[in-house]
Amino acid sequence: MELANFTKIIVLPTNLEAPKELKFEDIIARPLLRTDLTDDLAGVNSSVNIIRETRGGSWPSGELTAEEDFLDLAWHEREFGSNSSFAYVVYSANGEYIGCFYLYGMGVRTELTETLAEYDVDASWWVTTKAFEQGYYEKLYYALQTWLIKDFPFTKIYYSNKQIPSV
């Protein structure tokens, strides 16, 4: 069966709400909201190249305007509320914006295949250039590996970033 035009939705048990916080060492993540616009816009626009090199994909194609980013954040907020995907903003314990991570149904970010249909979720992340230089790219990946199995009902997670750390 050709699956390329399909997506596999994220399924959470009816009694489980998506976690609202990830804490790991000096990383704190929470749902991405429209109120994160100032930090997010500065973070994305200062880090377009590192995002494209590590996360891959077509976003961002260049610097974003405040209006474009606001619409993007509002869309992520809406999807989180409907449990169709989950976007989180990441800060350091001292309040510095680090980046974001996303949980999508299989087939949304990565074309669905029979092999990928076996996975529960597609996880991807990015960090700012400064955070990358400080080792947060690897640290966030490690945090996600632990948290997604412990706090979500996922057993098989596909990490779709272009660069996967070897930690």
Image: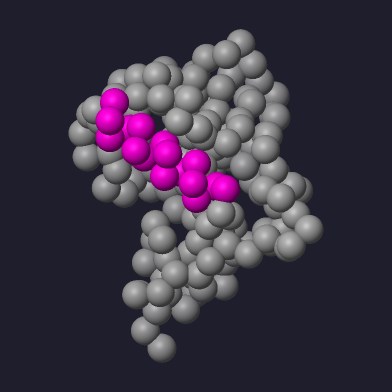
Relative vertical location of residue 24 with respect to residue 38 in this rendering, above or below? below
Q: Residue furthest bottom?
A: 1
Q: Nearer the viewer, residue 124 or 138?
A: 124
Q: Quadrant of residue 153?
A: bottom right
Q: Nearer the viewer, residue 89 or 73?
A: 73
- Residue at left offset 44%, top offset 69%: 7
Give x and y (percent) for residue 18. Answer: 67, 48
Quadrant location of the C terminus? Answer: top right
- Residue at left offset 70%, top offset 29%: 23
Q: State yes or no: residue 74 in magenta.
A: yes
Quadrant location of the N terminus? Answer: bottom left
- Residue at left offset 45%, top offset 53%: 160
Magenta segment's dominant SS is helix
Q: Tell me if residue 62 can be seen.
A: yes
Q: State yes or no: residue 72 in magenta.
A: yes
Give x and y (percent) for residue 29. Answer: 61, 30
Range shown magenta: 66-81
